[in-house]
Image (tube, rainbow, N blue to C red):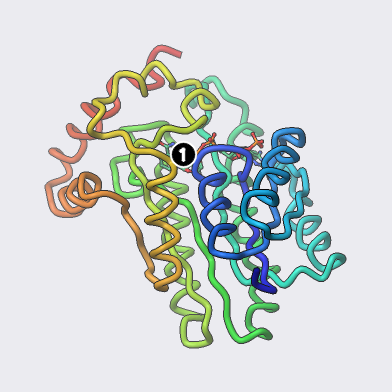
Amino acid sequence: MKNEYALVTGASSGIGLEIAKRLASDGYNLILTARRTELLENISAEIKNNYKVDTALITKDLSNENAPQEIYDFCELNKFKVSILVNNAGYGIKTSFHNTSIEDEEKFIRVLGTSVIMLSKLFIPNMLADGGGKLMVVSSVASFAAPSAIQPLYGPIKTFMNRFSDSINMNYKHKGITSTSLCPGFTTTGFHTASGVQDEMDRVPKFMVFSAERIANEGVDAMYAGKSYCVPTKTYKTLVFLLKNIPQSVFNLLGKSLAPGRYDKK
Ligand SMILES: NC(=O)c1ccc[n+]([C@@H]2O[C@H](COP(=O)([O-])OP(=O)(O)OC[C@H]3O[C@@H](n4cnc5c(N)ncnc54)[C@H](OP(=O)(O)O)[C@@H]3O)[C@@H](O)[C@H]2O)c1
């Protein structure tokens, strides 16, 4: 067991849960956070038992603007030395853009964007004082795709977070802090049910869907290696290469065929 902690947001299911398990298997103590307390309690106990590491949990809704500060204060109070920060929590908005209230978008931006910036801002000074640290932002292949291919804000906020992660590397890599944008494609998790698009997900060809465990392992390996980006699997590496190199019109067409009718009927 190391004397270091990894903080994982969105640790109650999917990719975040698998990242937490992988980090525990590598000897990191964990601070797990999400909204579902009971689930976190069960996961925390299971990880502690299976991997013999220390685990702590704090239930927070990251759409609440005070949540990042409260998570940081919890770590400080308990003297947890956080050397890894995994910003993973996320979801998609179920409703069409014209039917949501602006509060829906504001909450969404807080969970996928502002809270990531705030947690990074809070933990980076300690990492600098400790001589280094590792950040991960769980982004998406959608960050490289046409915004029209999925709901209006999801792709753009992931692109924004990639750029944020780039700037962390630009500013802090020489001081021992690296940030990895993990950009998965379709992954079997609770995401599609939580985001109201499970039917669409069920129609995605199987060769394009990967397990959360595989995504987590590729992401953690890339984070340990200090890589700026990780697009897991050859399938999505190829897709991202094409997305970066083909004309916008073809790119848009591809986006539509990969996410047919998504959100249109709501
Ligand atoms: N699944 C995919 O196909 C896919 C593809 C590309 C990228 N991603 C990204 O991967 C990340 C993880 O998603 P996933 O696929 O693993 O989905 P998931 O199984 O639904 O997990 C999402 C996690 O985020 C937490 N979360 C959601 N809203 C929250 C809030 N307001 N405050 C705090 N925590 C919140 C959830 O916990 P609680 O509900 O307990 O709060 C859960 O632990 C997301 O950033 C997503 O955008 C997913």
Identify the element where label 1 is drawn. Answer: loop
Left/right placement of residue 82 relative to residue 243 reads right
Residue 100 rendering spot, x and y as whole percentages: 57, 24
Q: Give the residue type that dot 1 points to.
A: Leu
Q: Quadrant of residue 194?
A: top right
Quarter of image, ligand 1: top right
117 vs 174, nearest the viewer: 174
53, above or below 35, in the image:
below
Location of residue 258 by image quarter: top left
x and y percent of residue 6 in the render? 63, 63
Instruction: Write the residue at 42% across / 73% down.
Output: 226
Residue 196 horizontal/vertical position (percent): 50, 21
> Is residue 78 rendered to the left or right of residue 49?
right
In the displayed image of the protein, which residue is found farthest to the top? 265
Residue nearest the viewer, comparing 158 with 14: 14
Identify which residue, 87 or 148, lies in the foreground: 87
Depth check: give the residue in front, 197 or 230: 230
Mark 1 sits on what residue?
153
Residue 210 in the image: state x and y as whole percent.
33, 38
| Residue at x 75%, y 40% (from the top left corner) | 41
In terms of image quadrants, where is residue 160?
bottom left
Q: Residues within 10 Å of mark 1 (few under 14, many from 20)?
A: some
